[in-house]
Image (spheres, helix red, strand yellow):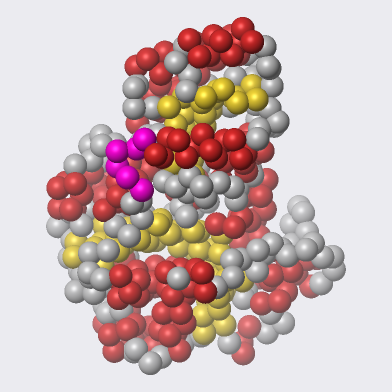
Amino acid sequence: MAKGVRVILFTANADYAPTLRHHLLGIPGVKIVAEVDDTILLTQVAERFPADIVLMDLDPLPDEVLPVGGALALERQDLHIFALSESTDGQLILAAMRAGIAEFLTKPLDVELLSIAFDRVVSRKTTGDNSGQLITVVGSAGGVGATMLASNLAVELAAMTGPGQVALVDMDYRFGQVATMLDVQPSFTIADLVESTEQLETSMLERAMTKHESGVHILARPHHFAQADMITAATCAGVLTNLQQLYKYVVVDGPSRFDVGGKPIFDLADINLLLIQLLVTSVRNVHRIVESMREVGFNMDRVKIVCNRVGKESGSISIEYVEETLNHKVFISLPDDWTTVCSAINMGIPLNKEHGKSRIRQSIQKMAEMIHQPQHTDKAKELPAKRGGLLSKMFSKGT
């Protein structure tokens, strides 16, 4: 299977886009770094986002779209341009080949053939096959514990892989607290990488990282609010892609919002951890996120639901009800151990330093093991659709 393939997706067909996205993200290792629906923007996007392949849906106007792909193929020798169309006209296929199109695929798309074509690109990549895993930790609401989880998960992964193998990135650009959580004073932040091109130099990235005694390297949020406005989706894609070439794991605290700015990060990630508490408000938000992901054709195998602060106070909302409502299994539950967590946060230390035997630390350590050695755990799969139940009524469409 393809691994570490970065794709820019072009399609002007909004109805077909979710199907195409679903096919792409169903191939292990494929990352959609950007999506475009206007040929005028395609060249600009290709310049700003690091990518290996541009997959162009030629329909419904192949005569207008194909020349743009051909010009891009001529200008960018490092990009592989794939064309997709429902047409099997020999003249169109011949024109595509003459224009420098690397692969011509027909609809309905044969995913196996697409995967084989991606494998050919991977085999020719000079960077090898050493791309690290990107893990996002996304809170369903403020205060559910996303920063705590991201920070401690990174520390646990570092303990399993060794110093300098795990990066922790704060993508809450205004109010991120990763640096505070681990009591470090960063000299440089992600804002210092904004003006760089997508081909960031290794020395520049390494200088921006703050080293923690646990072995985790931290890329902190900007020091000033004004700097946050300068960070774009292209910056994020470039930074995260380059970090994956340097680290075995890249753990991201965020994005803090499920919006257009956060979408590329979800697409790039190997694992998206959605953190919830067993509260109606929290579960409702995750329900909206999950439904939106399904609507746009997102690969739900990359989504892991994590329940935080699970205890007796959860009341009538149980994990079973959450799984039924979301039609998705819960990856892991973290116990309610607020006293321990609060102490660690106020001291600026990871849980494994002075609370190694606590229930919350042991649960996060188990989660890290499940990610580091997935062959020993079951993947979160969607459950058969069910009707009825407290939460299914609570989260019916339109609520």
As drawn, the residue found furthest toward the right would be 388
Residue occupying image coordinates x 33% and y 51%: 130
Point out residue 3 in the picture as x, y percentages from the top left corner: 44, 47
Magenta span includes 236: no
Point out residue 265 in the picture as x, y percentages from the top left corner: 45, 48
Residues 255 and 60: in front is 60
Asked if residue 229 is positioned above or below residue 117 in the image, the reply reads: below
Residue occupying image coordinates x 44% and y 75%: 369
Q: Would you say 68 lies left or right of 79 here?
A: right
Point out residue 344 in the picture as x, y percentages from the top left corner: 32, 83
Q: Would you say 121 lies left or right of 375 here?
A: left
Asked if residue 225 is positioned above or below residue 304 in the image, the reply reads: above
Q: Would you say 213 lies left or right of 315 here?
A: left
The rendered magenta stretch, by its main secondary structure, is classed as loop
Residue 197 in view (yes/no): yes
Asked if residue 74 is positioned above or below residue 131 in the image, the reply reads: above
Residue segment shown in magenta: 124-129
Residues 68 and 313: in front is 68
Residue 235 in view (yes/no): no
Residue occupying image coordinates x 68% and y 71%: 322
Point out residue 213 in the picture as x, y percentages from the top left corner: 19, 74
Q: Identify the image quadrant of residue 47.
A: top left
Residues 341 and 21: in front is 21
- The quarter of the image holding the C terminus is bottom right
Magenta span includes 128: yes
Number of marks in the image?
0
Q: Would you say 302 lies left or right of 206 here?
A: right
Residue occupying image coordinates x 49% and y 37%: 118
